[in-house]
Amino acid sequence: MLGNSQDAEDVLQSTFLNALKSLPSFEGRSSILTWLYRIAVNEVLLHIRHQRPDLQVGIDGDDSSDNDFTPYQFVDWCCLPEAELLSSESKTYLDKVIQQLPEKLRVVFILRDIEGLSIRETGEALGLTETTVKTRLFRARMHLRDQLSTYYYERLDKANI
């Protein structure tokens, strides 16, 4: 979520220190994993706010003001060799595109699709409804699909030349 391993280590350390201090107040209304994710997300947002105070970051709020995402193009990736899809260049590009997602879409995408939390667990960790989690996840996936379609379209074009 931070795009920098040193910052991620700092946030991880803060997360565990805060969790340790807050453990006596853990009520058990959610799983311990969900509780830890919530602390971690709060620490990430706090870190981002300290790094860039002019930037407004958050995971809550109304999504109705967001522009609807309209995909630019769809590309059939069937003809690309598997090595191209799994190349380190492709993985680097995917990481870059994930980092470019708006914060509230990125955090949902990472928790759900990378960390493997369920929709319910993601909602609990972020303090969002399941509907909001599903909406943001859909928007994040559509944005990524559009960006990757452009990326792989260029590779298909080069392969056909």
Image (tube, grey):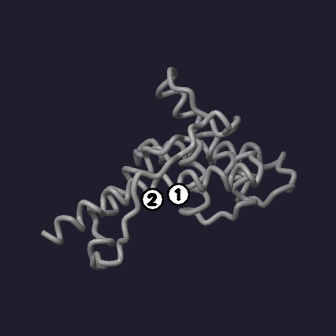
Expressed as whole percent of the image width and height from the top left, the position of residue 23 reads 78, 49
Residue depicted at 39% across the width and 56% down the height: 73
Q: Quadrant of the C terminus?
A: bottom left
Q: Amino acid at mark 2?
A: Arg
Q: Residue furthest top?
A: 54
Among the 4 quarters of the image, the one containing residue 46: top right
Q: Judge the density around disc 1: few (<14), some (14-19), many (≥20) Cα neighbours within 10 Å.
A: some
Among the 4 quarters of the image, the one containing residue 63: top right
Give the CA distance from mark 1 to mark 2: 6 Å
State left or right for residue 40 relative to residue 31.
left
Expressed as whole percent of the image width and height from the top left, the position of residue 149 reads 37, 60
Expressed as whole percent of the image width and height from the top left, the position of residue 87 reads 28, 69
Residue depicted at 42% across the width and 46% down the height: 3
Numbered circles on residues, count: 2
Which residue position is annotated with label 1? 141
The residue nearer to you, when weighing 114 against 129, is: 129
State left or right for residue 21 relative to residue 110.
right
Expressed as whole percent of the image width and height from the top left, the position of residue 62 reads 70, 36
SS at badge 2:
helix
State left or right for residue 85 relative to residue 71.
left
What is the number of the mark on residue 30?
none
SS at badge 1:
helix
The residue nearer to you, when weighing 76 against 83, is: 76
The residue nearer to you, when weighing 135 against 83, is: 135
Which residue position is annotated with label 2? 145
Q: Judge the density around disc 2: few (<14), some (14-19), many (≥20) Cα neighbours within 10 Å.
A: some
Find out whether the residues at labels 1 and 2 contact each other: C-beta distance under 8 Å: yes
Residue depicted at 37% across the width and 59% down the height: 148
The residue nearer to you, when weighing 18 against 86, is: 86
Residue depicted at 35% across the width and 72% down the height: 77
Q: Amino acid at mark 1?
A: Arg
